[in-house]
Amino acid sequence: MLSRTADHLYWMARYIERAENMARVLEVTYSMSLVPNAAQSEAALWLPALEISGNVDTYEEEYGDVNAAHVIHYLAMDADNPSSIYNALRNARENARAVRVAMTSETWENINALWLEFSQFIGQDLAKTGLREFCDWVKARSHLFRGVCFGTMLRDDAFSFVRLGTFIERADNTARLLDVKYHLLLPEGEEIGGAVDYYEWSAVLRSVSAFQAYQKIFSDTIVPWRVAELLVLRRDMPRSLHACLDEISPILEQLSGARHTECRRLAGELHARLRYGKMQDIFQHGLHEFLSDFIDSNNLLGAEIQRAFLSINAS
């Protein structure tokens, strides 16, 4: 496969996943804003959404104070924010348009219709009306995109790069979400198990579609360290770090073939740490440190994938 074609497919999938992840962040933050005393101030509640996206500095330069209306617009509709849902969906459609012949007609029609339908939300004040409906729409269209890809694409290199982009992006977002939310919501000992605490952690689990999975696995009160275990080490949880590397590692082995690529080695190393790691050891050394290191390693893995397969001179 030509590197340019692989690049477009890989980034198309990453942008679709990024849009869904941003919608999930907005949805969980909005849900927590409805809980009395969920945060000391509006700024304290909405700042983590910016921290997850990694755009605090650029937001403050453009908007100044942190408030719900500005953060929602910035993360959802701001054309100048490269991480906004608007730009993610636009870039996904542009990448798809560039390689229409490499995907099925159903896949192209789905992503083109997604972009055309998105126009209904442009100009709306999502902070006042329709944020939940907007987030539900973004998630539903993302699910539909993956379903069409899975149901219609030939299991060749094109399909592999679509899947690879999806799980690299998903792993990054899950790690960022857990890192920021864990330290924001970890309560003092006397507050553990309170009504607000339960609702907030429920909202975090729902943001990654893990609430029912948590209940089924643990059958107990929601506690922070079990949430962390579910989203880091449980390979049967679809959005966990372990589940993402379960997908990434074999894809890179297939694409690399007999080549000993650095991205294949990095993926194997990350996969081994999650497969054989223990939650008590992770907490002993610090969950924040573990997640920060994972995010850095995942970014490095993405850079090595770019170098090995997606650059113009890749073989």
Image (cartoon, grey):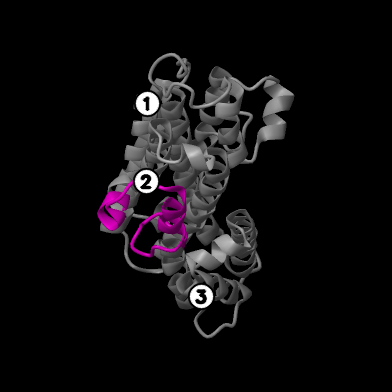
Label 1 amino acid?
Arg
As displayed, is residue 182 above or below residue 67?
Answer: below
Span colored in magenta: 214-241
Q: Position of residue 106 (x, y in %)?
A: 29, 48
- Mark-to-mark CA distance, 1 and 3: 38 Å
Give the label on residue 272, or none: 3
- Mark-to-mark CA distance, 2 and 3: 28 Å
Q: Which of labels 2 and 3 is toward the front?
A: 2
Q: Quadrant of the C terminus?
A: bottom right
Q: Is 135 one of the magenta-colored residues?
A: no
Q: Which residue is mark 1?
A: 132
Tell me whether the residue at label 1 lies in contact with that at label 3, contact meaning CB atoms closer than 8 angstroms: no
Q: Nearer the viewer, residue 266 or 112?
A: 266
Work out whether mark 2 precedes mark 3 in sequence or the reverse, and give the earlier one.
2
> SS of the residue at dot 2?
loop
Pointer 3: residues within 10 angstroms few (<14), some, or many (20+)?
some
> SS of the residue at dot 1?
helix
Label 3 amino acid?
Ala
Q: Position of residue 137 (x, y in %)?
A: 34, 32
Q: Which residue is mark 2?
A: 222
Give the label on residue 311, or none: none
Q: Residue at x 38, y 42 (%)?
A: 111
Which quadrant of the figure has residue 41? top right
Q: Residue at x 50, y 71 (%)?
A: 277
Work out whether mark 2 precedes mark 1 in sequence or the reverse, and give the earlier one.
1
| Residue 3 can be seen, yes or no | no
Q: Which of labels 2 and 1 is toward the front?
A: 2
Q: Is 223 one of the magenta-colored residues?
A: yes
Q: Nearer the viewer, residue 307 or 262?
A: 262
Which quadrant of the figure has residue 47? top right
Label 2 amino acid?
Ile
